[in-house]
Image: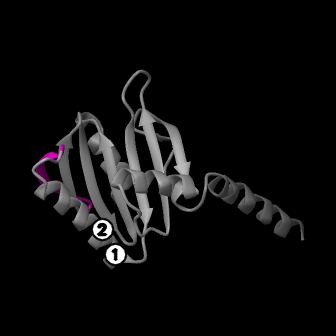
Amino acid sequence: MIRCLSFSLCLLAVLLPAVAMGGGLAALLPESVGDLTRVQLIAGPDAQVEVDKLHGKALAAEESVVARYARPGERPAEVWVSRVADEAEARRQAGLMVHKMYENPRSPFKDPSRVDHSGRAVYRFIGMGQAHLIWFGGDLVWWVSASSQDEAAFLDAFCR
């Protein structure tokens, strides 16, 4: 009985922070990436509002989370993650974003390229003073905006 209670308390100690942060996706976003510290975490319905606002319309997502990472006095990097219905929908949404960024002559996103990281295709653009990295994995769609010097650290942390 005591072992069961101890195990239950340990399990609760591990799971409670993830629940308090707003669900499963928030647990994917560590306190730091390289030497950047997480300065903001938006989860739950508030995160979906942010994602929808970024795209100018409601997106089909089951859950979203947004995190910002920064060094003191620097512009933060942003990580946007959405869980969608399945891998096919994740592929569709990521492909649509890349296509719209590539095809729109007024897009602030330039110099498109594709890089492979840990066996995943990552689509990279430059714009608004940052590198923008888009990929999907399973039922998750990722968008990272970071300085060019930090993009490798973000890919290592999240694109696996």
Q: Main secondary structure of the magenta part?
A: strand
Q: Which of the two residues, 10 or 89, is positioned nearer the viewer here?
A: 89
- Residue 148 visible in this rendered orientation of the protein: yes
Q: Position of residue 112 (x, y in %)?
A: 12, 51
- Which quadrant of the structure image shows residue 149? top left
Residue beneath disc 2: 93
Left or right: 154 with respect to 111? right
Range of residues picked out in magenta = 108-119
- Which quadrant of the structure image shows residue 16? bottom right
Indicate how the structure is coloured in the image.
Answer: one colour
**Quadrant of the image for the N terminus?**
bottom right
Q: Residue furthest right?
A: 1
Tell me whether circle 1 and circle 2 mark residues in contact (CB < 8 Å): yes
Dot 1 alpha-carbon crowd within 10 angstroms: few under 14, some 14 to 19, many 20 or more: some
- Asked whether residue 82 is drawn in magenta, I would say no
Up/down of 105 relative to 139, above or below: above
Tell me which residue sits at (54%, 54%) in the image: 26
Q: Which of the two residues, 150 or 2, is positioned nearer the viewer here?
A: 150
Q: Position of residue 9 (x, y in %)?
A: 79, 60
Tell me which residue sits at (48%, 59%) in the image: 64
- Asked whether residue 114 is drawn in magenta, I would say yes
Left or right: 108 with respect to 44? left
Structural distance between the alpha carbons of marks 1 and 2: 6 Å
Dot 2 alpha-carbon crowd within 10 angstroms: few under 14, some 14 to 19, many 20 or more: many
Left or right: 95 with respect to 57? left
Residue beneath disc 1: 89
Q: Position of residue 127 (x, y in %)?
A: 20, 40
